[in-house]
Image (tube, grey):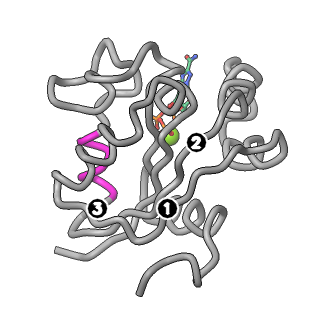
Amino acid sequence: MAIEQTFSIIKPDAVERGLIAEILKMITDSGLKIKGMKMMRMDRAKAEGFYAVHKERPFFGELVDYMISGPVVVSCLEGDNAIERYRALMGATNPADAAEGTIRAAYGINIQNNACHGSDGPDTARTEVAYFFNDDELVG
Ligand code: RTP
Ligand code: MG
């Protein structure tokens, strides 16, 4: 099993509701290690760049507005098979479809305000970690 890194965002809806600690506890209880973490507020350009892959989707404008509506907590997570494991821990995009025990089932509000983000593959994980973290912000 390969050690991987993945990128996580605790989204504005979850930060606003005081859920940072609960979500980080689910992450660390799952065995994933936090290699870097910070709280920040994205500006529009940062969020548009992050979600560039979705720019033709009808929900893009609303998604960007939401992601800059308040602070987020970004982190780099590491572990065996971390990308898939974190996707499984988050649950389905729409909290209504998310399995019991997942972050989105516990804390997601709707398909947009769904509490967390996780990279969907090795290439996006690398790109997304580098989009938010310098090397010296990740512990060795
Ligand atoms: P994420 O990228 O945030 O980890 O979520 P995901 O892979 O499960 O979902 P994705 O299809 O990549 O969509 C990115 C984010 O856009 C919002 N969304 N809104 N209004 C809608 O129909 C809709 N669909 C997706 C969600 O915040 C989703 O996480
Ligand atoms: Mg995605």
- Residue at 73% across / 45% down in the picture? 42
- Using the image as rendered, state which of residue 122 and residue 107 is in the foreground: 107
User: Which of the 4 quarters of the picture holds residue 44?
Assistant: top right
75 vs 54, nearest the viewer? 75
Find the magenta span and give its range.
83-89
User: For this view, does 65 lie left or right of residue 67?
Assistant: right
Characterize the local packing of mark 1: few (<14), some (14-19) or many (20 or more) Cα atoms within 10 angstroms.
some
Q: Is residue 135 above or below residue 77?
A: below
Q: Position of residue 74 (x, y in %)?
A: 53, 53
Report helix, strand or loop for mark 2: strand
Q: Secondary structure at mark 1?
A: strand
- Residue 47: quarter of image: top right
Dot 3 amino acid type: Ala
First in sequence, mark 3 or 2: give its number.
2
Which numbered marker is on residue 72?
A: 2
For badge 2, the amino acid type reads Val
Q: Inspect the magenta stretch and tell me whether residue 46 lies in it.
A: no
Q: CA distance from mark 3 to mark 1?
A: 16 Å
Labelled disc at residue 82: 3
Q: Which residue is mark 1?
A: 37
In the figure, 102 relative to 83: above or below? above
Q: Nearer the viewer, mark 3 or mark 2?
A: 2
How far is mark 3 from mark 2, CA to CA?
Answer: 21 Å
Report whether 99 appears left or right of 91. Answer: left
Apparent side of residue 92 relative to residue 101 in the rendered image (left or right): right
